[in-house]
Amino acid sequence: MSGKTVLIVDDEPAIREMIVVALEMADYECIEAADALEAHALIVDRQPDIVLLDWMLPGTSGIELARRLKKEETTANIPIIMLTAKVEEDNKIRGLEIGADDYITKPFSPRELVARLKAVLRRATPPGIDDPIEVDGLTLDPASHRVTSNERSLNIGPTEYRLLQFFMTHQERVYTRSQLLDQVWGGNVYVEERTVDVHIRRLRKALGEHHDYLIQTVRGAGYRFSTQPA
Amino acid sequence: MSGKTVLIVDDEPAIREMIVVALEMADYECIEAADALEAHALIVDRQPDIVLLDWMLPGTSGIELARRLKKEETTANIPIIMLTAKVEEDNKIRGLEIGADDYITKPFSPRELVARLKAVLRRATPPGIDDPIEVDGLTLDPASHRVTSNERSLNIGPTEYRLLQFFMTHQERVYTRSQLLDQVWGGNVYVEERTVDVHIRRLRKALGEHHDYLIQTVRGAGYRFSTQPA
DNA sequence: CAAAGCTGTCACACAACTGTAACACTCTGG
DNA sequence: CCAGAGTGTTACAGTTGTGTGACAGCTTTG
């Protein structure tokens, strides 16, 4: 449930599968891409917490992709671990130069992979990810896992909490029901889209009339968290 | 609804049909042409988001058409994927040289086709497709799906939103009712042309007197979005 | 093991949006 | 100045999209 999303980019399905098994055991959620283009799409689309990126890729090489990711505003702070087949110090240098956060040489043990990954995730955790978020008297405090509306503590369920957290960290932007299912429920769950509506309803109710205006319906598109009244 | 329009140019109806089936499954809208002339007409008329272009065509060859498209201002940035029957590196080189964005050798699987197509469309997407557009105090922000007139958020319906978005990305140009139906409603819908008038009316109303001058009537031709008063 | 809490679905109520037709108005050319 | 065509405007009925409450299955809590 607390599983971060890991994107695995490698052109060999066997290697991907190996990694997936190792990571899922450690409670990470895995998504896969076979080439740089697919990877880029998934990154934009799913916003993984970290990317495992093979050095050699057909078409656009891994290092090229890494460079591009670090250049783009929206993807710049997604940590990257490079996977390289040979021990080449050069590669290491260049990889780290362009912004990769760590690199692992194949072959590696699952244990090692998980360890490195954890380390990078911990280190790379954006400062203040655990800081409370406050909007117009509504506070969500990840540390204490508590939501308050004008000092009054709210009774809020797990799903509503995650939903609210997602919204408060992604304000002023519309998300479709499908995107919300991906982001809040986790990618590979089969749940009716209308379920989102119900949890939105529950969240609004929990927020009370003081703050339910923050969750806005965008007809035909989805929902939006915004401080500006619709 | 989010389906991009794909123009398929191939002289063999069977192949076209195969592609159409594959793409429609993936929620693309397909239009077809059997030769270069027909293709050119459709491109000008319907402005597809991407063109699948057979290498060999009766009359003007595919490569010739591609070259022409890349030379013309209004069609230069429509991505092209070349379809070629044989694996000839030469063709690949020449194809990419003249501006094709990718090429696929027959036979290909529907999966591959869709994947490539997605990739090209993504790559070709102009940077900042999600950036807000602002004209004289009127702002349309795709990310938040919000339209503001001098800071004031407007209440606008889905169709009016799409209509406005189309206009703001295609300013200073007249569009007939028929073209607007194609572009905003989607090609294969049967709707009365007068319906456009009604939605124009609704859009103008929503914009209010500050900004309704932007939507201009061109008698006998259609409508135009222009910052210069009629 | 019972009680309480959560989740996902459903069915129905309600609101917004859509396309059309009908009528009013405006412009154009003769 | 008078058709007639082209466009503006309104009302309305059908359709679609959302809100809402209830409920049964499950999990957690005590």
Image: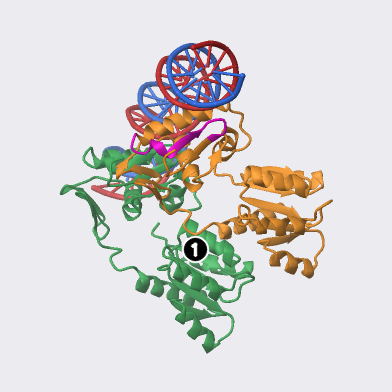
Chain colours: A green, B orange, C blue, D red
- Three-letter amino acid code at disc 1? Glu
Check the image and report above or below for A158 versus B154. below
Residue B219 x %, y %: 53, 31
Please say whether residue B212 is one of the residues in the magenta stretch.
yes
Chain of the residue under label 1: A
Confirm whether residue B23 shows in the render.
no
Residue A84's image quarter?
bottom right
Report the front residue among B208 and B114. Answer: B208
Residue B99 x %, y %: 67, 63
Residue A6 x %, y %: 48, 64
Quadrant in which the C terminus of chain A appears = top left
In the image, taking residue A27 as reference, residue B177 lies left or right, namely right
Check the image and report above or below for B130 versus B175. below
Residue at mark 1: A24
Q: Residue at x 63, y 43 (%)?
A: B46
Mark 1, other Cα within 10 Å: few <14 / some 14–19 / many ≥20: few
The stretch in magenta equals B209-222
Q: Residue at x 45, y 48 (%)?
A: A181
Residue D5 x %, y %: 59, 22
Please say whether residue B128 is one of the residues in the magenta stretch.
no
In the image, taking residue A112 as reference, residue B115 lies left or right, namely right
> How many marks do you count on the picture?
1
Q: Residue at x 73, y 69 (%)?
A: B93
